[in-house]
Amino acid sequence: MEHKVPEFEWLGFHFDASALMMIGITTVIVLILAFAGTRKLSVSNPSKMQNFMEWTIEFVEGIIGSTIGSKHGKGFIALGLTLIMYIFIGNMLGLPFSIVTEDHVSWWKSPTADIAVTGALTVIVIVLSHYLGITRNTKHYFAHYFEYKGAMLILHLIEVVSKPLTLAFRLYGNIYAGEIMISVIIGAGWFGVAPLFVWQGFSVFVGAIQAFVFTMLTMVYISQTLIHEEEH
């Protein structure tokens, strides 16, 4: 059965109350994890959370090193760490359970199962990448548009427009489809217990991959506007 979205209107705009709530919950969880991982830093006796945070940072450094490079990428570690943690936690929230009221209004879901949320994340990434290109690599940022002529220029502009669309819809589509499947399996009653555990395990894998892909592509897009051909 299709669930309704709890909406409210403010200043003429319609807002999804459940999406806003889940965005806030995801933010709080990420802040708690970050605080727990850096609360009692120790070289000789690091805590499990410190080890986890250090591993995550090293993982993000690896992503940045393979895309932007160590020379230009040091300043983007915090961005990459925030993205991968926020998206992964957001992807996981809709897996354990859902909260649906008697009038079929859904209150608990993954925030990334909402196209508005993934679209907002994508807008931030795209605007940031172009801003960095304009401010830090001005000459080559504008010059590369004149390298294309005729049909090639049209194809290049289509590519520029399609990047944010594919980035937003890829994350949204995978997480939304996963939650739909969970609802279908739950609807099977006791017959769906075993498949539910299997699918949730697979959904954890998909959620982790999507967080990795989004972060990786973010760094790729930044590198494309920040680094010009002469430096390769």
Image (cartoon, rainbow, N blue to C red):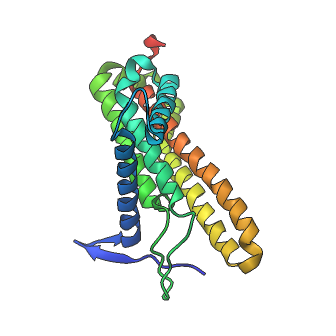
Furthest residue in direction top, as rendered: 230
Q: Look at 41% across and 20% down and name the residue there.
A: 227
Residue 129 on image: x %, y %: 37, 34
Question: Relative to residue 187, is residue 209 drawn left or right?
Answer: left
Count of marks, rendered view: 0
Quarter residue 14 falls in:
bottom left
Residue 18 on image: x %, y %: 40, 70
Q: Nearer the viewer, residue 114 or 90?
A: 90
Residue 71 drawn above or below residue 107: above
Q: Is residue 150 at least partly visible in the picture?
A: no
Question: Relative to residue 88, is residue 222 drawn left or right?
Answer: left
Residue 70 drawn above or below residue 171: above
Quarter residue 140 falls in:
top left
Residue 196 drawn above or below residue 4: above
Q: Look at 53% across and 30% down and name the residue there.
A: 152
Q: Is residue 183 at least partly visible in the picture?
A: yes
